[in-house]
Amino acid sequence: MTTAPVHRTVAGQGVRLAVAERGLEHETAIVMIHGWPDTKALWNPIADHLAADYHVVTYDVRGAGESGHPTERDAYRIEVLVEDLAAIIDATSTGPVHLVGHDWGAVQGWEAAGIDFGGWLASFTSISGPSLDHSGYAIRAQLRGGPRALVALADQVMRFGYILTFATPVPRRIRRSGPTSRINRSARRFLARALQLVEHHPPDPDHPAPAVAWDAAHGTQMYLANILRRLRYPNERATDVPVQIIEATRDPVVRKLSIDASEPWVANLRRRHLPGGHWMVRSHPTEIAAWIAEFVKFTSGGHQSTELCDTRVDGHLPRRA
């Protein structure tokens, strides 16, 4: 089913945020946050599935798509990103929402679940994105572990090695080149082909986004503004919000270590596995939409299936470093 979205803008923290809404306003709201270097179009297939029964909200985060593109690094701090999310929820819903995040959208979701906006989150589904705070505590534990723990940590660190390029002048030059530059067009063709080969899904006119290189260059500010700061000085982010983790078993970037880090901090956790890559939201939209809908129904007071019950993980808070 395809439901034509209604587009509008919402005032974020100093930027205008481009929003798309599907479904009926009086239905349960599901807010979906994309990651890097995507736009809200990432969610189109899943949002279309869910719109028959829910009010589905997607938006371009700051620095992406049709939303504002701040140039200052501090404008991409996770605290500011979550304030944007709060503005979206306030503008599109009259009650608690079910949050879904992918990649950096999941990173923001973990932050939101940890502070819970005073009860505005009914549930959170995390896809291919870790909590920076949980990861910070996990790194400390791994450093105190034996050889196997250190090997697992080294593997995850090496897979995040691409972040080092974000501190070079290249992203700044791309930001200055504009969204229609030759480098942007070349990057889009390369990424589209790479996703077809690695993620095993057919060509898609909506993904990657037309200005993917320009958006990506702005999005590097999220990494530089948050990762080292939060890993070195993590916050204690235990949450009572019901959480569902959908883990991509073939994700070349986000490894099991990063996902495991959140288990001790979540009181009500479900964890599921799907044999897909990092962008499995595009290659497996039907399965993911079904899992989101099932979790939303359950956390809204519905019946819990045997399959969902079997995904339950019992948390236990870790010892502090």
Image: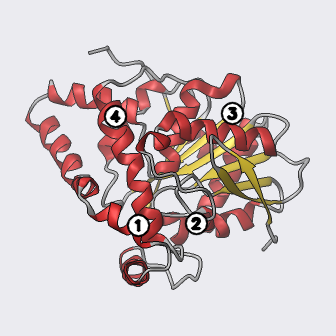
- Identify the mark at residue 17; answer none if there is no mark: none
Please state which amino acid type lies under the numbered disc 4: Ser
Query: Could you tell which of marks 3 and 1 lies nearer the N-terminus?
Result: 3
Q: In this picture, is 110 found above or below 190?
A: above
Query: Could you tell which of marks 4 and 2 lies nearer the N-terminus?
Result: 2
Disc 4, SS: helix
The residue at which mark 1 appears reads as 176
The residue at which mark 4 appears reads as 135
Q: Residue furthest top?
A: 320
Which numbered mark, 3 or 1, is in the foreground of this view? 1
**Residue at the image position 32 percent from the left and 14 percent from the top:** 319
Please state which amino acid type lies under the numbered disc 3: Leu
Query: Could you tell which of marks 2 and 1 lies nearer the N-terminus?
Result: 2
Horizontal and vertical percent for residue 308? 61, 44
Query: Could you tell which of marks 4 and 3 lies nearer the N-terminus?
Result: 3
Specify whether 279 is left or right of 4: left
Disc 1, SS: helix
The residue at which mark 3 appears reads as 121
Q: Quadrant of the C terminus?
A: top left
Specify whether 56 is left or right of 143: right
**Residue at the image position 34 percent from the left and 52 percent from the top:** 254
**Residue at the image position 36 percent from the left and 47 percent from the top:** 223
What is the C-alpha distance between the residues marked 4 and 2? 25 Å
Query: Could you tell which of marks 4 and 1 lies nearer the N-terminus?
Result: 4
Specify whether 148 is left or right of 244: left
